[in-house]
Amino acid sequence: MVKYLTQSEAINVDQDLFKKYKFSVDQLMELAGQSCAIAIAHSYPLSSHDNANNILICCGPGNNGGDGLVCARHLKLFGYAPKLYYPKRTKNDLYENLLHQCLENDIVLIENVTDLQKKNNYLLIVDALFGFSFKPPVRPDFISIMDYLKETTVPICSIDIPSGWDVEKGKPEIGSINPEMLISLTAPKLCAKNFSGKYHYLGGRFVPNKLEKEYQLNLPKYYGTDLVVQI
């Protein structure tokens, strides 16, 4: 049975990928974001109807947000119409380049939550706000977007961790988002045991066999050349 990681285990696995196995941050981010786009395309196929392929991607300032930026670019290449909401941008070359790539692919950048509320015709909202390093409470810059996600009727897809959830305990008792889809990266985290949505995928066909055995991850088998597998 696949192992669900604690927060400290998730951090240690990430550190081993960087230090022991010499993956770079941008390399893992590209693989993760592409996996997310593929999983979304599997579960929410393209439509021939006008404006039926709009996807909103909400990005935070960390690696989870970087995964969202990569995901947006791949969704655009797949034929979707992604739009970005990126309220607190990270000022280093990696994130600036990822955003630049999105803008050069004509992905619309939405500047405030009020504009999101005016346009609720999304096929899906991708939650790429907070990753497994998140510790409550939610910072002021993200309260309005979190309120929006809690109230929307549009299906939500969370990348790795549903934002606002405790990485180990899962959904807060009061006021939380309820994603229809969860894409775990590398290996699922403990909070995923509380996920009750329709689609749960694992993305991360880059984990070395040695690392999988060391942490006893018991990852599910990917089929053929697939980069994602449904759990």
Image: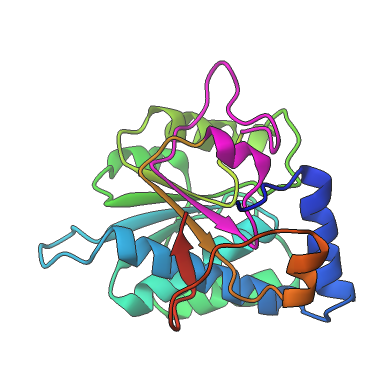
Task: Identify whether 4 is placed above or below 89.
Answer: above
| Image spot of residue 231 (x, y percent) | 47, 54
Task: Identify whether 131 is placed above or below 230.
Answer: above
The residue furthest right is: 19
In terms of image quadrants, where is residue 215?
Answer: bottom right
Q: Tell me the magenta residue range.
A: 165-194
Q: Is residue 93 magenta?
A: no
Task: Identify whether 111 is placed above or below 101.
Answer: above
Q: Is residue 192 magenta?
A: yes
Q: Relative to the observer, which residue lies in front, 186 or 163?
A: 186
Left or right of 48? Residue 9 is: right
Please indicate, yes or no, whether residue 70 appears anywhere in the rendered image. Answer: no
Q: How many marks?
A: 0
| Image spot of residue 16 (x, y percent) | 85, 68
Residue plotted at (43% across, 39% down): 179
Task: Identify whether 158 is placed above or below 148.
Answer: below
Left or right of 116? Residue 158 is: right
In terms of image quadrants, where is residue 46?
Answer: bottom left
Residue plotted at (70% across, 58% down): 217
Q: Relative to the observer, which residue lies in front, 23 or 128?
A: 23
Q: Relative to the observer, which residue lies in front, 224 or 55?
A: 224
| Image spot of residue 144 (x, y percent) | 53, 32
Residue plotted at (48% across, 32% down): 177
Q: Relative to the observer, which residue lies in front, 206 or 180?
A: 206
Please indicate, yes or no, whether residue 206 appears anywhere in the rendered image. Answer: yes
The residue furthest left is: 49
The residue furthest front is: 1
